[in-house]
Amino acid sequence: MSHPSPLTKTEIVDRYFLEHRAKLLDIAALLDRIDRASGDDKIDFRIEALLECAKELHSEEVGRTERMLLLLSDKTTEPIEEAGMKGATGAVPPQS
């Protein structure tokens, strides 16, 4: 459920624009570094997930955050035998 903001649209932009501008530039810089790097030409599943999430930024429908979180979330319900690594990857790896 969406709740109205106590701030106006202009107040939100004035307060948060520069911070989020920097975040977008950070993502662009990451993608540029990957493009310039040598190695496997296959796109990593985490980058694919980021690019899918970026498509949501063009949506005019409320709920972008939820849709992006769902794109990054593992929807499986059955436990796995053994984890492939110690930490989370931040996106769902392809099924092997």
Image: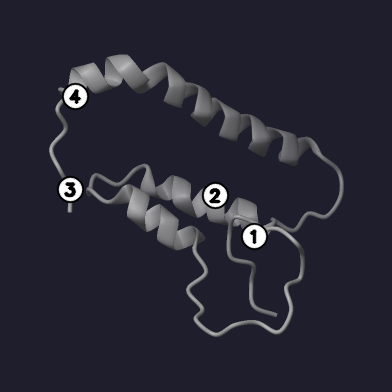
Q: Amino acid at mark 4?
A: Lys
SS for tag 1? helix
Q: Whole-percent x and y of residue 35?
A: 73, 40
Q: Amino acid at mark 3?
A: Ser
Query: Foreground mark, 2 or 4?
Result: 4
Rendered image: mark on residue 45: 1
Q: Which residue lies under the disc numbered 4?
A: 9
Q: Around disc 2, counting alpha carbons within 10 Å, would you say few (fewer than 14), some (14 to 19), or many (20 or more)? A: some
The N terminus, quarter of image: bottom left
The C terminus, quarter of image: bottom right
Q: Is residue 37 rendered to the left or right of residue 71?
A: right
- Residue at mark 3 to residue at mark 2: CA–CA distance: 24 Å
Which badge, 3 or 1, is on the more N-terminal residue? 3
Front residue of 5 and 53: 5
Q: Is residue 14 rendered to the left or right of residue 41?
A: left
- Residue at mark 1 to residue at mark 4: CA–CA distance: 35 Å
Which badge, 3 or 4, is on the more N-terminal residue? 3
Front residue of 18 and 84: 84
2 is higher (above) or lower (below) than 85: above
Q: Which residue lies under the disc numbered 3?
A: 2
Query: Foreground mark, 3 or 1?
Result: 3
Which badge, 2 or 1, is on the more N-terminal residue? 1
Q: Whole-percent x and y of residue 67?
A: 36, 57
Q: Which residue appears at 42% of the width and 17% of the height?
A: 18
Total labels drawn = 4
Q: Around disc 4, counting alpha carbons within 10 Å, would you say few (fewer than 14), some (14 to 19), or many (20 or more)? A: few
The image quadrant that residue 78 belongs to is: bottom right
Q: Amino acid at mark 2?
A: Leu
SS for tag 3? loop
Q: Which residue lies under the disc numbered 2?
A: 50
Which badge, 3 or 2, is on the more N-terminal residue? 3
